[in-house]
Amino acid sequence: NAGVMQNPRHLVRRRGQEARLRCSPMKGHSHVYWYRQLPEEGLKFMVYLQKENIIDESGMPKERFSAEFPKEGPSILRIQQVVRGDSAAYFCASSPPSGQLYGYTFGSGTRLTVV
Amino acid sequence: GENVEQHPSTLSVQEGDSAVIKCTYSDSASNYFPWYKQELGKGPQLIIDIRSNVGEKKDQRIAVTLNKTAKHFSLHITETQPEDSAVYFCAARTGGFKTIFGAGTRLFVKA
């Protein structure tokens, strides 16, 4: 079991470009969560998805950010027209469908640097 | 919505001593409280959790306690070792699947 796979590990984008972050959940996990971590700070909830559905996007900025989890393939977090303030580590986590009282499994994160 | 506060932000202990990290939560409906350890350059890893129907749980050198009345929960690490040095996050979950994290505690264990 490969765990939660995130790619790329590091991503450098110029201001105004688009960033695409990918997350493949653990086998058997159908719930995916994205969190953002600024340097020396905690984990901030962004969005919670199930296959083909966004369940809770209350932590995601209304503009430039979007997320999807298609029927086939990984979950994608997309940031359009990136700005310096988007520089952060973005972590994806997954949990099984019955996992209301179980912890998440996190990936190793994607470190986005906007130059 | 849920809010989780965590203290201290930094904790330095001598190898072999105990370390205690404390958290409070705001939503009395929260029913699941996991703790995560994050090492440099890695994702958080679940180390122990406790559910709201339990007051205490222990796993080797790690224990968690929960006081539902006061809405406090704590992580206790005994006989600390240098490899325990990391950032520790408490978290709380209310009902559904969304988890809110504390700001983290950076633990230094001095050899």
Image (tube, rainbow, N blue to C red):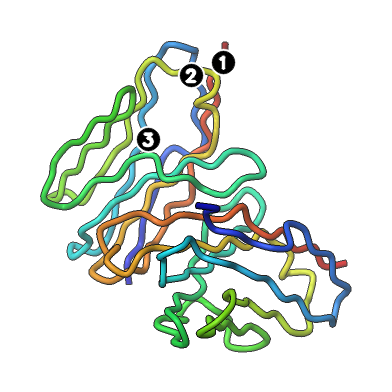
Circle 2 residue: B13
* Circles 2 and 3 on the same subunit: yes
For badge 1, the amino acid type reads: Lys
Q: Callout 3, which amino acid?
A: Ile
Does label 3 lie on the same chain as label 1? yes
Real-space Cα separation, disc 2 to disc 1, in angstroms: 6 Å
Q: Secondary structure at mark 2?
A: strand
> What chain is tagged by disc 1?
B
The Cα atoms of the two marked residues, 1 and 3, are separated by 17 Å
Q: Residues within 10 Å of mark 1 (few under 14, many from 20)?
A: some
Whether B95 is drawn above or below B24: the answer is below
Residue A108, horizontal then vertical, whole percent: 61, 52
Give x and y (percent) for residue B13. Answer: 48, 19
Query: Which residue is the site of mark 1?
Result: B110
Question: Residue placed at 39% from the left, 61% from the top?
Answer: B100
Task: Give the residue type that dot 2 points to.
Answer: Val
In this view of the protein, which residue sits in the foreground, A12 or A6?
A: A6
Q: Are marks 2 and 1 in contact (CB under 8 Å)?
A: yes
Residue at figure coordinates x 64%, y 88% from the top left: A63
- Identified at 28% across, 71% down, the residue is B96
What is the secondary structure assignment of the residue under circle 3? Answer: strand
**Quick check: A45 left or right of B58?**
right
Task: State the image coordinates of residue B18 (x, y, percent, origin top left).
Answer: 37, 19
